[in-house]
Image (tube, rainbow, N blue to C red):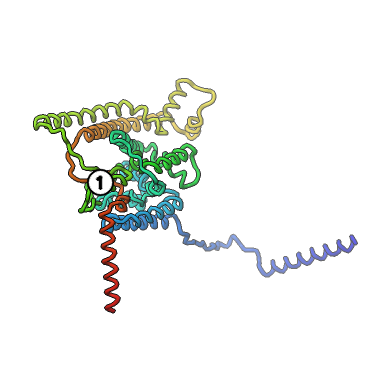
């Protein structure tokens, strides 16, 4: 039996060898010395540029639909549909990046650093909501922004905060925006992207602390209107400036009956009720108060500038070159047997202390200048907030605070006059269609 198996294996080996010899004669070994160049093939693989283009197109389309819904139609249903699409596409499918909120940093860095090439799509993602806000109000915040849309979809109840508390918390987005500009301008960090509370939720993973914070914000959003948009979002603070001067605006129905339903329905307290200022002051007192404000503003700005300049040394520790220089300098004074990893890598790459010192000195000077300006801006923000709290003017009817209004359209469904107007329009359209059908 063993001899038969051995002969069978030998026969198989002979067959394979003969086949290999025949193949060698038919397909001779290629001559790599002949200079022949094999052709290179390139494949048109759809890349990130395609999706970025889709992002821009969809962003503009969704803001257009929202503007049409809240200004022309005064209906919330299209805004609600846009919110769902935004959460699904910009949120979970595109993982919340790149977003208009974080694009602030890219734009600032491109202005400061000429070597930084910012993609056109990133600039469009940043500027398009600004343009739409100038024309139609904060339609981007209504439901196109996935962060605002996610908070809007989970909202079931609105507990109102006092005016003083809302004003105090409303300072935070401005401080956040100023520091984001500071760290982007000094090429230190993109803190908006680093501390984004919803990215971990959309990506279903990431830093546990930020995911927990995002979850807490969503829980708070269920019981009060959009806490992130109102008290944290730096881009919302920027859009609120342009919304103050928007050309076409959301308005209270012309036939307002002062039923207060829209005021109670607004999740962000952007509809101000009628107010009668009973404390009448003399003209002289009013002039004195105005002069006090004019003195208060520059004093607060100066105080903020001094505080920012004094804090520039501590603020600069965020920059990696500043941190590295201080570690190297400390190691030069007190040498260690085991150096920090960053210091060891720096010397292993041939870096010199003089070059690092010069680079750190330039960054430190930039931080002094930018921190001074940032402190002055923070001082102005605080001063203007305090002045707004002290100013009381008479309102005869309900008024919309367009800087705070996020164009969510919730008030439309509660206003009886608006509902009546929509039903009349719907009946007119049905009658028109019926007449046209009979005519044909």
Rendering coords of residue 170 (x, y %): 31, 37
In percent of the image, x 40 and y 40: which residue is there? 220
Q: Could you classify mark 1 by the number of other residues whose Cα lies within 10 Å: few (under 14), some (14-19), or many (20 or more)?
A: many
For this view, does 217 lie left or right of residue 28? left
Q: Quadrant of residue 24?
A: bottom right
Of residues 121 and 88, which is closer to you in this image? Answer: 88
Q: Quadrant of residue 34?
A: bottom right
For this view, does 166 lie left or right of residue 205? left
Image height of 35 relative to 320, above or below? below
Image height of 419 relative to 356, above or below? below
> Which corner quadrant holds the C terminus?
bottom left
Q: Residue furthest bottom?
A: 440
Instruction: State the residue position of label 1.
Output: 402
Mark 1 secondary-structure assignment? loop
Of residues 103 and 387, which is closer to you in this image? Answer: 387
Image height of 434 relative to 311, above or below? below
Rendering coords of residue 356 (x, y %): 40, 31
Of residues 157 and 182, which is closer to you in this image? Answer: 157
């Amino acid at each position: 039996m063993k001899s038969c198996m051995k002969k069978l294996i030998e026969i198989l080996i002979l067959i394979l060898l003969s086949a290999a010899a025949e193949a060698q004669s038919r397909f001779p070994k290629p001559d790599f010395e002949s200079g022949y160049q094999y052709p290179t093939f390139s494949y048109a693989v759809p890349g990130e540029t395609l999706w970025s283009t889709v992002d821009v197109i969809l962003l503009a389309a969704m803001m257009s639909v929202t503007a049409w819904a809240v200004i022309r139609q005064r209906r919330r249903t299209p805004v609600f549909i846009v919110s769902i699409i935004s959460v699904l596409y910009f949120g979970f499918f595109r993982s919340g990046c790149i977003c208009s909120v974080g694009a602030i940093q890219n734009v600032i860095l491109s202005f400061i650093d000429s070597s930084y090439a910012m993609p056109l799509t990133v600039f469009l993602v940043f500027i398009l909501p600004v343009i739409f806000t100038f024309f139609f109000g904060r339609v981007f915040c209504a439901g196109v922004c996935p962060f605002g849309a996610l908070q809007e979809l989970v909202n079931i109840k609105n507990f109102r905060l006092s005016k003083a508390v809302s004003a105090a918390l409303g300072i935070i987005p401005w401080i956040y925006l100023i520091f984001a500009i500071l760290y982007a301008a000094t090429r230190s960090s993109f803190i908006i992207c680093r501390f984004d509370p919803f990215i971990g939720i959309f990506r279903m993973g990431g830093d546990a602390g930020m995911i927990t914070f995002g979850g807490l914000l969503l829980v708070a959003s269920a019981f009060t209107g959009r806490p992130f948009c109102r008290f944290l979002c730096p881009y919302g603070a920027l859009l609120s400036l342009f919304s103050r001067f928007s050309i076409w605006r959301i308005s209270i129905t012309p036939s307002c009956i002062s039923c207060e339903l829209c005021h109670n329905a607004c999740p962000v307290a952007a509809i101000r009720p009628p107010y009668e200022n009973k404390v009448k002051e003399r003209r002289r007192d009013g002039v004195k108060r105005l002069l006090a404000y004019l003195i208060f503003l520059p004093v607060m700005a100066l105080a903020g500038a001094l505080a920012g300049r004094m804090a520039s040394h501590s603020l600069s520790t965020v920059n990696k070159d500043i941190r590295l220089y201080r570690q190297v300098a400390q190691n030069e004074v007190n040498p260690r047997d085991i150096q920090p990893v960053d210091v060891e890598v720096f010397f292993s790459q041939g870096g010199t202390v003089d070059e690092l010192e010069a680079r750190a000195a330039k960054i430190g000077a930039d931080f002094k200048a930018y921190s001074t300006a940032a402190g002055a801006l923070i001082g102005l923000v605080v001063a203007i907030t305090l002045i707004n709290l002290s100013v009381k003017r008479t309102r005869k009817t309900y008024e919309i605070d367009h800087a705070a209004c996020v164009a969510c359209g919730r008030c439309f469904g509660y206003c009886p006059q608006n509902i009546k107007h929509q039903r009349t329009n719907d009946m007119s359209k049905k009658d028109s269609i019926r007449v046209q059908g009979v005519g044909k």
